[in-house]
Image (cartoon, grey):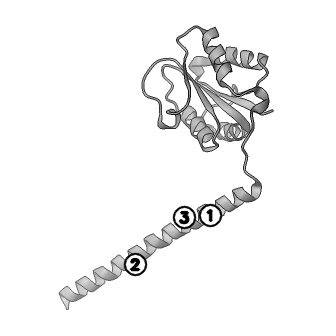
Amino acid sequence: MQHIYLSYPRSEYELAHRLVDDLQAAGYAVFIDAVSEPGSLAWSAETRRAIRASGAMVMILGARWRRIGIRHEGVLARRGRKPVFVLRRGSGPLPRYLRDAPVLDCSEPYESVRDRLLAALPPAGQLAAETLPIRRQQRLRRQAARRRWIAWAGWAALAIALSAAVVLVFGWITG
């Protein structure tokens, strides 16, 4: 069984920990980062590892949710094709990477929000981590490196061609 990764701003600490207790009582394993400082190297590595190993993500967005850590976590979950569920206080537009995620309004009573979240989540036994095999990861890295090399080679060829054109044009003018 995989865990649910719970992302929350520090302002929603009480809600997050209450939700952890209820999710665990419902049979889910929950990962919550309560120790690392957001933005630190240890935090980045730990969240990356935990999100890759998770089966789903629950994001709590407070009234002032805009912080780099939440964006980092949400983008990683989307890249890993993890289902993301948003618990939200306040209004305003959602970022692009969360526009198609189910959103539950936290201004309602907590028990109602909790019950709707539990109904929306896949059963605890069906959460699965989607990790790529090592060889495929290595192949994807090589392909990305090859694309970068081709892009740089293209820019270099363009620079040489422009330099040659400038020399020819100025050669015709002065000659």
Residue at the bottom extreme?
Answer: 175
| Mark 1, residue position | 143
Q: Quadrant of the C terminus?
A: bottom left
Q: Nearer the viewer, residue 6 or 122?
A: 122
Q: Secondary structure at mark 3?
A: helix
Horizontally, residue 113 falls left or right of residue 26, namely: left
Q: Residue at x 71, y 35 (%)?
A: 55
Q: Secondary structure at mark 1?
A: helix
**Looking at the picture, how far across and down is residue 21, in whole percent?**
74, 16
- 37 horizontally vs 31: left or right: left
Work out how far the residue at label 2 is from the one at label 3, CA to CA, in angstroms.
18 Å
In primary-sequence order, the first of circles 2 and 1 is 1
The image quarter in which residue 121 lies: top right
Label whose residue precedes the other's in the sequence (2 or 3): 3
* Looking at the image, residue 41 lies above or below residue 62: below
Check disc 1: other Cα within 10 Å, few if <14, some if 14-19, many if 20+: few
Mark 2 highlights which residue? 160
Three-letter code, disc 3:
Arg
* Foreground disc of the pair 3, 1: 1
Residue 22: x and y, percent?
A: 73, 15
Q: Residues at badges 3 and 1 in contact (C-beta under 8 Å)?
A: no
Label 3 vs label 1: CA separation?
9 Å
Q: Amino acid at mark 2?
A: Ile
Q: Residues within 10 Å of mark 3 (few under 14, many from 20)?
A: few
Q: Which residue is mark 3?
A: 148
Distance of mark 2 from mark 1, alpha carbons? 26 Å
Is label 2 in contact with label 3 (beta carbons under 8 Å)? no
Q: Is residue 99 above or below residue 64?
A: below
Position of the N terminus by quadrant: top right
Against 42, residue 34 (above or below) is: above
